[in-house]
Amino acid sequence: MPIKRVWAPQIDFSALRRELRLPGEFPAAVIAEAEAAVGADAAARVDRTDVPFVTVDPASSRDLDQAMHLERLGGGYRVRYAIADVASFVRPDGALAAETWVRGQTIYLPDGRIPLHPEVLSEGAASLLPDVERPAVLWTIDLDADGAIVDVGLERARVRSRAKLDYDGVQRQVDAGTAPEPLALLPELGALLARRAADRGAVNLPLPEQEVERDGAGWRLVLRAPLAVEEYNAQISLLTGMAAAGLMLRGGVGLLRTMPAPKPEAVAKLRAAAGSLGVGWPEGASVGAVVAAVDPATPRGAAFLDQAAELLRGAAYTPFDGTPPAETGHGGVGAPYAHVTAPLRRLADRYATEVCLALVAGSAVPEWAREALPRLPKAMGDTDRLAGSATRGAIDLAEAVLLNGRVGETFEAGVVDRDDPGRNRPPGGTVALDDPAVRARCLGDLPLGERIRARLTIADPATRKVEFEHTA
C-alpha cells in the first residue's frame, strides 16, 4: 500500500523513535561482517556492463535498488531491470542476516531513516551507484505491443549504471523530449502499463508528499503531488513483481504479496465521502478510474486519496511450497504480485528473488531461502506494523505542531468517515480540512459526505493528538 510521506526536519521526532523502540546503530559484529563482505562476491555472473543502465530516484537517495534500460523489440518492448543483489553480501547464517530479520525493512521518518542494512552496503557496495560495477539480479522482460508479458529472463549479472537521475530532472527531460536513451520509452510504456492496470481493476494511489515549513511564528503545510515519471517508474516495478509472481505460481513455490479486493461496503462508504471533498464519481465508474482523475496536489484531492487508502487493507505475505494458495491476487494491483525489487530496503525481497532465480535456472531453491518462506509473513507483518506506526506518528506529530496555538478556532471540513454504530466510545468520525490540509478525528453526530463546521479542541504535540468537535 502506498504511504504518504511527511517532511518536517525542524520538528523533534526523537520521542517517537524512543516510544516505538526503533533500532539505533548496528552492532559492531554486524558492521564488521558487512565490511568484510565488500568485494567478496563469488557468484558466477554474466557481464552486462555494456547495457547503459540508469537509476531514477529521489535526488537525495543513495540506497539505489533498481537500474533500468528500455528498448523496442520488434513491435513490442524489452525491459531490463537490474536489482541490487543483496544476497551476495549477506551470509544466511551470519550476524548481518540475523539483524535484518530484527529490522525487517528500512523505516522512514522526516528527520532520517532507520536502514535495513549498514550504510557500507546500502549506500555503498550493494547500491547501484553510477560509474562503478555492481553485482545485480537482472530481469529481462519482453512485452508485446499491448504491454503483455511474452517472456521473462533472470540472471546474476555485473552491471554499471551510467547515471544517477532524479525524478524532477527526468520529468524536465521528458517534457522537453530529451530523455536519455535508456528512459526515452518510459512515458510511452509507463502509460501503456497504467492503462492495462486500470483495465484489470487496479487501484493506484498517487499519494502526495507533505512538507511542514516554518511560516513566521507558526507552520504551514505544503503538498507535492507525484510527478508523472514517478508513476511510470512505479509501473516498471509492478510489472517485475507480477512477472515474479507468475514464475512462482508456475514453479509451485514462492512468496506472494496478497490483498483482498476492496469490499463493496467500503467502496460505498468512500463514494459517499467523495461528495464532501468535491470529488465526482460518475455512475458506473470504478474506484481506480475515480482515483486516477483526482488531483493529489490539492488538499481535497489529497484527503480523498488518503481515505481511499483505507480500501487497501488486509495485505499479507503468502508463502506456498507445492499447491498454490487459494487466494493469489493483490486487490491494489489487480493481479498476482510479489515483492522482489527493493532488497536493500525490504527483507522479503531477498528471499523471493532467490526463489525466482532457481526457478528460471531449473535448479533447486537454496534451502536457506526455502526454509525462510513460512517465517517471513510474521517477520514482515511485525515490521509493517512498526513502519505504519512510525509513519502515522510522524504525521500526527506534524499536524499537532501545525495546529498548536489554534485551539478554539472553527474550520470548514468535509466528513470523510463516520464511526460504525455500536462502538463503545462517543460518536464521531474523520474530517478533512482544506487549510491546513489535515485529516483528524472529530466528535459528534457527523453527516458522512457533507461539509460541516468543526471546532479544534485539542492540538497537543506532546501526545500527538488532534481532535475536533462538530459545531452547529
Image: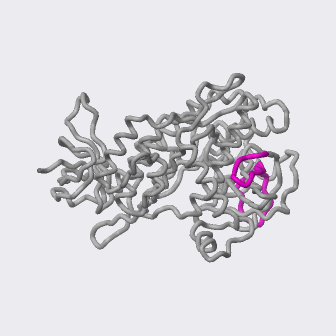
Residue 29 visible:
no
Residue name at image x 78 percent, y 31 percent:
365
In the rendered image, the vertical position of residue 333 relative to residue 177, given as above or below: above
Q: Was residue 127 drawn as part of the magenta stretch in this picture?
A: yes
Toward the viewer: 323 or 21? 323
Please provide percent x and percent y for residue 30. 66, 44
Residue name at image x 29 percent, y 63 percent:
435
Residue name at image x 34 percent, y 40 percent:
269
On screen, residue 445 versus residue 133, left or right, reads left
Furthest toward the front, the residue is 283
Please provide percent x and percent y for residue 436. 30, 61
Q: Was residue 253 drawn as part of the magenta stretch in this picture?
A: no
Please provide percent x and percent y for residue 80. 76, 55
On screen, residue 275 versus residue 324, left or right, reads left
Residue name at image x 65 percent, y 36 percent:
98
Please provide percent x and percent y for residue 71. 77, 61
Structure colour scheme: one colour
In the rendered image, the vertical position of residue 312 relative to residue 184, given as above or below: above
Question: How many numbered marks have been drawn onto this rendered protein structure?
Answer: 0
In the rendered image, the vertical position of residue 152 relative to residue 132, given as above or below: above
Residue 305 visible:
yes
The residue segment tinted magenta is 126-151
Furthest toward the left, the residue is 472
